[in-house]
Amino acid sequence: MLQGVSGTYPAVSAACPCRTPVRHWGKKEVKMGKRGRACVVVLGDLGRSPRMQYHALSLARQASLDVDIVAYGGSEPHSAVIENECIHIHTMIQWQKYSHSLPKILYPLMLLLKPIIQLVILLWFLCFKVPPPDAFIVQNPPSVPTLVAVKWASSLRKSAFIVDWHNFGYTLLGLSVGRSSPFVSIYHWFEKHYGQMANGSLCVTRAMQHELAQNWGIRATVLYDQPPEFFCPTSLQEKHKLFSRLNRYLCHPLGVRDCVTATTTGIGADDQNETLFTTLVDTDILLKPNRPALVVSSTSWTPDEDFGILLEAAVMYDRRVAALLDENDSADEGVLWKEISGGKQYLYPRLLFIITGKGPEKEKYEEKIKRLNLKRVAFRTMWLSAEEYPLLLGSADLGVCLHTSSSGLDLPMKVVDMFGCGLPVCAVSYSCIDELVKVEKNGLLFSLSSELADELLMLFRGFPNECDALKSLKNGALETGSSARWAAEWEEHAKPLISEVISRNLN
């Protein structure tokens, strides 16, 4: 049931599916709490908070609880969340929607009032709008005013207070105002002080677990991000259907002329028989031998992901391929594209980068992309639904992750999703990324744009049939993705902690 600000929550029905105990891996089902309810709190766009959506699904499916989610609206959550009768979404009013119409002279005052208003709205929802839960589970960051509101609400409603540490909020604030700012120190104090008040804590890496224990006095259980069941390899038939739906955006974007649009003039925007990558022959779907290699990167378009590295690597790939094939710099790109349209294959393929996500720096980089003027590389930016995004990952040849972590202690969930779909990854190297990306097994690491360009050249040489290094990494990614799934990880690590915290809180 999807609910808005004015929505009401239904009485719990005995027929609700989450009331039927679900057994996993032969373990005896343990009933959690006396209220049979949990509340998941996200001071952000729920549709862009997949880990908290997965928590809600596991609480409903694996712990047999009714689940209230208090979050902002925006992007559509996954259909599995919306359609689950035991999950009830309460959408808060988003501050930003109302501040744009105010005179600029009032902006400083509004910035000071923002956390106070958010605190009041959170307390209203947590203390009055949702039924009293056995436990609140809150995403951190953001820390202010979220941790304060959830702590106060948990005390008032006699509920357990659990923090899921995704990163440290004060390090993210430091990216925008500078780490030496007094606001960062104040934020750090609130985050640490209220984090220590939690009845239980989860975190995303062993490095973060160590930091919390050594410097924060917080004992946390590691709950690694793992792909849920809907992140899996995409069948050829599903690829064809997906690319047919995307024909308009891939082959006919307005005002764009590149190595994709110039070679797909015969493919209609609504063509169901032919796409950039596939073709339907009688009843058989075939991959085109001279198709471009598809590289996917998901980004939040924020300062902690330097998208410029990817653009520089794309330019280097384009120029180095031309040099390796002994092409004249002044050669007419139209001749090259005409040969590709005629079916000619080259030792190095065209690259199509599909960049998904929303964020503040998207338009800036889109303008830079328009000025690149590359012969063998094309870019598309788009936002996909929660159902189509896994299909795209499962259809791609390589993933690129530009996440660097403001704290150096969290891991990019996008890489977890890619592995779930059997997609190998080239990722920016930082302190704890090796907890996830195993070099030359399921991916490669880079620090400079030139290193990423080298990796693209090495992996795609002889594409699509004679690229053994890429095939080896793909096999490793498939093995990684199939070795662990979210439900099993949650059952082993999160469920015992949540059950124990709720039981302690009742005594």
Image (cartoon, grey):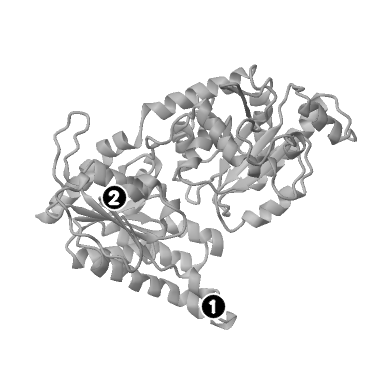
- Depth check, mark 1 against mark 2: the one in front is 1
**Residue 180 drawn above or below residue 106:** above
In the rendered image, residue 32, in percent from the top left (x then y), is placed at 16, 47
Q: Read off the residue under disc 2.
A: 201
Instruction: Tell me whether the residue at label 1 lies in contact with that at label 2, contact meaning CB atoms closer than 8 angstroms.
Output: no
Mark 2 residue type: Ser
Element on which disc 1 rests: helix
**Place of residue 287 in the rendered image (x, y in percent of width and height, measured from the top left):** 61, 24
Identity of the residue drawn at 33% across and 41% down: 223
Q: Quadrant of the C terminus?
A: bottom left
Q: What residue appears at the point 29 percent right and 39 percent down from the top-left corner? A: 490
Picture quadrant of residue 395: top right
Task: Kindly identify which residue carries mark 1.
Answer: 107
User: In the image shown, does 397 or 503 lie closer to the viewer?
Assistant: 397
Instruction: Tally the marks.
Output: 2
Query: In the orientation shown, which residue stands out farthest toward the front?
Result: 282
Q: Is residue 412 visible?
A: no
Give above or below for 5 relative to 47: below
The answer to whether residue 365 is left or right of residue 160 is right
| Residue reaching furthest to the left | 507
